[in-house]
Image (cartoon, helix red, strand yellow):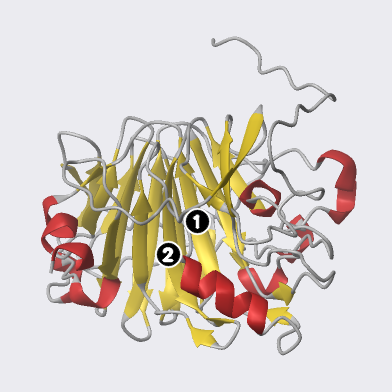
Amino acid sequence: MGSRIVESFVQLRKGKTPRRLHADLDGLKDDELGRGGFTGRTANLYRRHDPTAYRADGPLRPVDVLAGELKPADAADSRGEPLPLFDNDDCRIMLSRRRDPMPFWVRHIDGDLLCFVHRGSGLAETEFGPLRYREGDWVYIPKACTWRQLPDSETTMLMIETTDELRVPAPGALGRHFPFDPAQATIPEPAPADDDGRDGYEVRLVHRGGPTTLVYEHNPIDVEGWRGDNFAFTFNIADYNVVTSDSVHLPPTVHLFMQATGVYVMNFLPRPAEGVPGTERTPWYHRNVDYDEIAFFHGGSLYGIPMPPGLISHAPQGVHHGAPEKARERARRKFDEFTRVDWQVIAVDTRRRLTPSAEVLAHDLGQH
């Protein structure tokens, strides 16, 4: 275990700095160099120039791909599997675009599975019971739980498989007013499925080095009842209560939804825009010192500019990223015109560096 991060109440100032944090920049560029994913020791560097104005050559460079341009095998073949996007020792991130029901069941052996429904609706048939899903739903499947997907319509999902157990973060000072209210989750009722006369019931064990196939003589969804605190559920982002501030743009960590060792999943959702004049409304420049960052654009707009639905953005740690200076200047000019931020972005931060798949690199918008 690494040494504990120590924060100090005393903050040093050297040179020209604004009085307020992330505000009143007077032409300077706000660049944050911070540890522990915005929760540790921090330096705010006030620069003359946009730190994202660079060209990158090599593996540690930002990558942007459109989900609609990628072709998961399960989009064309009912027996196909999701498309790998990014990978490290703590998680795998995949894309599914299934239109036909699975003729088999799956069981993720390496860890828990958390799926975000970008488009479509349907049924997740689990051992705990059936779960209807719709756009904006998170679908949580515990490690080694048997389940299958039965779409009503073509369903695009971002899938996150974590090696360690996914947990809801401690609520801290917010207590029962934490953004994720468990009472809003949908928890299934058991509904054992009848056999349908097939010769065997295929269950795929999804794991590194796999898959392994089990063939049962009976339908594996045969649970009459269950009890405990480990179960599948769905939760829609419309029920997530966003934490806001009027005078400072809050760090991504306040929007945390679920976490596992080395993996943090966040919801950036519509909210009132910062209202105190001079406050910067866009995230400050930063270089993800300790975390890689994945942003999945579900929809919405940012001060009148539509967000590209299905854009998947990877910012590796140590490399500057953030909205370009022109977008920041526009947000300042139109400060009085917009009172809300209407974006819908799903974010995944990982402690270990992520490796993009060959398919992601082949469709990188920055290389075309």
Tell me, yes or no, whether the two marked residues, 2 and 1, touch with CB atoms within 8 Å.
yes
Task: Identify the amino acid type marked 2.
Answer: Phe
Q: Residue at position x 51%, y 74% from top?
A: 327
Relative height, residue 188 to residue 271 (above, below): above
Q: What is the distance, in whole Å, between disc 2 and disc 1 at their CAs?
A: 6 Å
Q: Circle 1 sits in a helix, a strand or a loop, which is it?
A: strand
Task: Identify the amino acid type marked 1.
Answer: Ala
Tell me the residue that label 2 is attached to: 296
Relative height, residue 47 to residue 244 (above, below): above
Q: Quadrant of residue 26?
A: bottom right
Residue 206 image offset from top left, x and y in percent: 25, 44
In this view, the residue in front, 361 or 280, is: 280
Q: Is residue 188 visible?
A: no
Residue 201 image offset from top left, x and y in percent: 23, 57
Q: Residue at position x 11%, y 52% from top?
A: 358
Q: How crowded is mark 1: few (under 14 residues within 10 Å), some or many (20 or more)?
A: many
Residue 25 image offset from top left, x and y in percent: 68, 57
Q: In which quarter of the image is the C terminus?
A: bottom left
Q: In which quarter of the image is residue 339?
A: bottom right
Q: How crowded is mark 2: few (under 14 residues within 10 Å), some or many (20 or more)?
A: many
Relative height, residue 256 to residue 170 (above, below): below
Residue 347 is marked as: 1
